[in-house]
Image (spheres, helix red, strand yellow):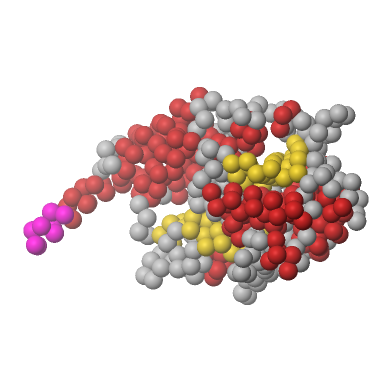
Amino acid sequence: MPVTDPKILTKNYGVADSWTLAAYEKNGGYAALRKALAMQPAQLVDEVKAANLRGRGGAGFPAGMKWGFLKPRPGVPNYITVNADESEPGTFKDRTLMEIDPHRVIEGCVISAYALNVQTVYIYVRGELVLSVRRLEAAVREAREKGYVGNRVMGRDLAIDVVVHAGAGAYICGEETGLLNSLEGKRGEPRLKPPFPAIAGAFGAPTIVNNLETIAAVPTIVEMGGENFSKLSRLHHIKDGGVRLYGVSGPVKKPGIFEAPVGITLRELVFELAGGPRDGRTIVGIIPGGSSTPVVREDEIVSAPDEKSVLHAWHGKSFFDVPMGVETFRGLGTMLGTCCAIVLDDTTDLVRAAENLMVFYAHESCGQCTPCREGCAWMAKLCGKIADGNGKPADLDQLYDVANNILGNTICALGDGAAMPMLGFLQKYRAEFVARASGTAKKAKSRAKSEARSHG
């Protein structure tokens, strides 16, 4: 059965000058805001809860539930901070919303602010995304001139401002409390929790931090109702609702961004929407949701005989045929993450790929936690040693030990986000690592060169 293209979040993709207010209004833009302002704020929170909207940034926490955690304090403002620091390797979905349809983001911000009694919304954008910043800033100006943002939103006694803040290109600022520190002008380091941002976030005030795509879905939830939005998903029954953006990068025929219901499979995403592998090539693995999610293979089979397991319905099937959901992918021992898949084919040097990821995490560690600071650098060094053909079998055991000693021992999830992929590569491609570490691969390559010279 072909995957349906709902054209909801992406309905303005391909529209001429889609980033302008005129184009957005022509296609129904800001009608959801008018509808929202006729509702009570508590009703809007209930609609987001009914939508079963799981956070689109990686953690997958229910957005409506997170909104319910906000703890206002007398005399202290509430804030919303939109996390658009899209810096996860392999992830490039949020920037398409910012560049192609920024007014959808602004409308989502204003509706969310009204629902949560917020006067200021900060959109924190990765500094390298220059076009995204410019498009958002232009959209805010247009919205302010038209009265959708400002001291009197749509002529009401309602003040809501939207501020676009460009970061400085640090991956750690994608972590919500590292983002808040950076927003305040401090070093981008994660904070100890509790207190959580909903109690003490930006500038010490109650703050909700949501991913940009999460906020961009809010106008649609208002337009069609939370329950109807949730039912667009194949996993509505396990409270994972709606549609979302998926990305595919790597050696496939049609890499890019695709909109589809929550719950499509990796096979549908990669082989149908992205066209499958290049001619004559074979896919050997897929990193399902950005580089911090452990790789999965087609020959891995679901083992879930327990009827209470969320994966029971897919017992005996390939991992590639399991619906892509927050809970289903946790059951596979990986994560849904950002839903931006990185494809590995039979031309990929898997040891080098692992080294590439570890070098990234070593570079991006903020250095606050010893296990992450030292461990990520150690894993990068060991992977490089093995990839260069200078490793030994004992190095594989050391890699396992270092990765396991990082897991669960850091303030934020960056350390886990490096250790879990490393363990995944070691487990799923052990033969390749053993061959490289034992010198087998290097010897085979040398022998092939020697034979080529003798025949030349």
Write the residue at 89% across / 50% down: 156
Which is more toward the observer, 168 or 22?
22
Q: Residue at x 35, y 59 (%)?
A: 347
Extreme residue in the bottom direction: 1
Quarter of the image with the N terminus is: bottom right
Residue for point 72% across, 32% down:
201
Report the side of 317 relative to 156 (left or right).
Answer: left
**Quarter of the rendering containing residue 97:** bottom right
Residue 330 x, y percent position in the rendering: 63, 48
Query: The C terminus is located in which quarter?
Result: bottom left
Q: Position of residue 218 (x, y in %)?
A: 76, 55
Task: Please report the residue visible at 49 percent of the width from the left and 55 percent of the height from the top.
Answer: 342
Q: Magenta residues, as a range?
A: 449-456
Residue 146 falls left or right of residue 367:
right
Residue lying at the far front in this picture: please name it: 145
Decide: is 132 above or below 19. above
Q: Nearer the viewer, residue 427 or 340?
A: 340
Does any portion of residue 136 appear in the rendered image?
yes
Image label count = 0
Residue 296 at least partly seen: no
Say if the magenta span includes residue 6.
Answer: no
Q: For this view, does 351 lie left or right of residue 236?
A: left
Q: Position of residue 384 (x, y in %)?
A: 34, 39
Specify the principal SS of the magenta part.
helix
**Residue 110 pos. (x, y %):** 78, 50
Q: Using the image, determine if residue 387 lies above or below residue 28.
A: above
Queried whether the magenta region covers residue 451, the answer comes back as: yes
